[in-house]
Amino acid sequence: MPDRRPFEQLPDNVQPINYGLCLKPNLIDFTFEGKLEAPIEVKNAPNQIVMNCADIDIITASYAPDRDEEYHATGFNYENEDENILQTGHGLLKIDFVGELSDKMKSFYHSKYTTASGEVQYAAVTQFEDTGARRAFPCSSDPSIKATFDVTLVVPKDRVALSNMNIIAMNPYPDDESLVEVKFARTPVMSTYLVVFVVGEHDFGNTFSRWDFNPCIDFITIADFAARAMENWALVTYWETALLFDPKDSCSSSCQWGALVVGHELAHQWFGNLFVFVDYTHAQELDALDNSHPIEVNVRHPSEVDEIFDAISHSKESFMIRMLHNYISDKDFLKVMNQYLTKFQENNASTEDLWESLEQASGKPIAAVMSTWTKQMAFPLIYVDSEQNEDFRVLKLPHLGEDCPQCMVPINICTCKSLSSSKHTILMDKPETTMVLEGMRPDHWVKINPGTVGEPVTWHKMPLLAACG
Ligand SMILES: [Zn+2]
């Protein structure tokens, strides 16, 4: 395995405010030409502008500070890099570059498909999560560094060009009358991994639906796609099997799976797109392995981001959210999420920010409970032992085994006398928790964790199960 170059985060003294991007993909030789015009803010007078850029060739680069003359660069380095040449303030960065539309199903690439008449055709599409944008244009691909984007695509007249926003102008391309220049409206402030370009044929129209949603959201299927879907801002791309469904021939599990994927990508329009967590932050089988990982992981290198977005991040998190929702109550959970999204929209938030908001609204120790889940791997095994006395029952709930993580578990208990599970809610915050249920006869049943909320596995001792029957 080749040595991995140590990762250095970009210096934060140059901040792009807007990316004016013009891209001209060539679907015959699978290359693209690009022009970037980015107003940037310069802080602390650095002597160079450092951006993320991979597998693209810079042709020219220049920087013009406001009210000053333009500087021309060779490659990435300014000719007189030893001097402090960049004044603090604002300026315009211009870069011309060329790149390749690869067949790797990531970054800006070409996808092959066959038309109804059997003709092989190609589309140019993107998949930027997590750091792929740097292979399409020089940028800051750190998700916490956000900007607006003005995208222009120069495409053959017989192709459809799509990007995050709606088209605001279509002009003839001056150098070639077979091409058209398609300009899109300015995006909201967002991370670079949410930018999307699609250039394809009009019969793509059969495979995506359009509906109005904040202000609109488009779905499109891509023939060659490495993920199941990607939540690009307002233009979600899907692998064909995740979106296309034939009521006659498809099985109901693929319909369920499609609904799950669509719901997931729509949820991302708020969670991830509207704001991003600054600490990036087959579930139980995977989580039981020695090489599992906790939900919260510090990322040291961009390639590690792919490694942590697995079933632990996606499936275990959903267990956690359901447990949290149940612990806090539906009313408080919805109220807090609303306030939280409004407070952090277009911004970056940390896990602690969310716990703090939920703690304030509920008065419950959310940060303490949740950190025992998100900072540890594996899941707790809880053993349930019960002892019947005259007219009450004692439940003992110890965590099982030495390797078992000592999580704080909010748990509900219902009995045949209290079908509403909220009657008995306890927070298991010790290695063993005891609970007394009054007025219970020997033939009364008890159910721990009704609705199977959250992830703990509970082992009932036989007498309790017998009572359930
Ligand atoms: Zn996701």
Image (spheres, rainbow, N blue to C red):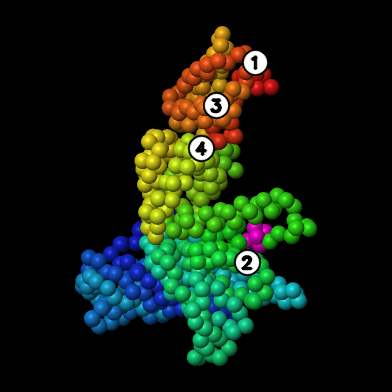
Amino acid type shown at disc 2: Ser
Mark 2 / mark 3, whichever is N-terminal: 2
> Within 10 angstroms of label 3, few (less than 14), some, or many (20 or more) residues?
some
Mark 1 / mark 4, whichever is N-terminal: 4
Span shown in magenta: 239-243
At mark 3, the secondary structure is strand
Drawn side of residue 361 relative to residue 334, left or right: left
Per the model, the C-alpha gap separating discs 2 and 4 is: 34 Å
At mark 4, the secondary structure is helix
Image quarter in which the C terminus is found? top right
Give the labeled residue for mark 2: 209
From where the camera sits, is residue 305 visible? yes
Per the model, the C-alpha gap separating discs 3 and 4 is: 13 Å
Quick check: marks 1 and 4 in contact, CB under 8 Å? Answer: no
Q: Residue 443 shows which numbered tag?
A: 1
At mark 1, the secondary structure is loop
